[in-house]
Amino acid sequence: MDEDLVINAGLSIPRTELSWKFSRSSGPGGQSVNTTDSRVQLSFDVANSRSLSSVLRLRALRRLAPRLADGCLVITASDQRSQMQNRRLAEQRLVQTLAAAVAPGPKARRATRPTKGSQERRISTKKNRGQTKRLRSTRVSEHD
């Protein structure tokens, strides 16, 4: 567990930048929940991290803004009975969250004009719909 936490091909975070807290968990585990600190809180200081470049840091701060407290991202895991499993789960969640936050945005859409055929189809559909509505209108005939 001493190696860096790999986020993606170009980014890894040294474990020295991660902060762990353990507490008692609610949930499965019966009486052992009352005696073991199996709940895990993993904190990562996004704002002051030396492993993030300035571009990635700004991108992560902007995308994670609602989840940050004083520039720190806090991940909590208490799903499993064992502290070790919750530690792994918290690390996985941190990796997924950071990978999504630092990923480049989608490519900008280039506007295109409608094709001649699509314009003709749209106009003919509109004409057919108008014709249907015209035929539906009530007309008083002279034979009544």
Image (cartoon, helix red, strand yellow):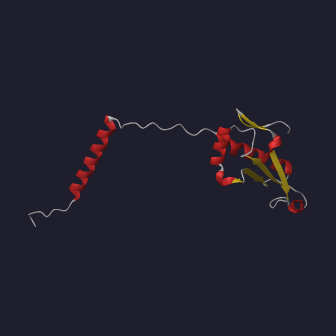
Q: Residue at x 82, y 48 (%)?
A: 19
Could you say which is closer to the camera, residue 129 or residue 90? 90
**What is the residue that sits farthest to the top in this orientation?**
9
Q: Residue at x 91, y 60 (%)?
A: 35
> Along the horizontal axis of the image, is 74 left or right of 59?
right
**What is the residue that sits farthest to the left in this orientation?**
142
Residue 73 visible within the image: yes
Quadrant including the C terminus? bottom left
On screen, residue 99 above or below 25: above
Could you say which is closer to the camera, residue 39 or residue 118? 39
Quarter assignment of residue 31: bottom right
On screen, residue 74 above or below 2: below
**What is the residue that sits farthest to the bottom in this orientation?**
144
Could you say which is closer to the camera, residue 32 or residue 7? 7
> Along the horizontal axis of the image, is 129 left or right of 53?
left
Q: Where is residue 9 drawn, in percent x and y?
A: 70, 32
Residue 100 visible within the image: no
Q: Where is residue 138 drawn, in percent x and y?
A: 19, 62
> Along the horizontal axis of the image, is 115 left or right of 135?
right
Q: Where is residue 18 drawn, in percent x and y?
A: 80, 45
Could you say which is closer to the camera, residue 62 or residue 41? 62
**What is the residue that sits farthest to the right in this orientation?**
35
Q: Residue at x 89, y 57 (%)?
A: 36
Q: Where is residue 52 drawn, in percent x and y?
A: 71, 39
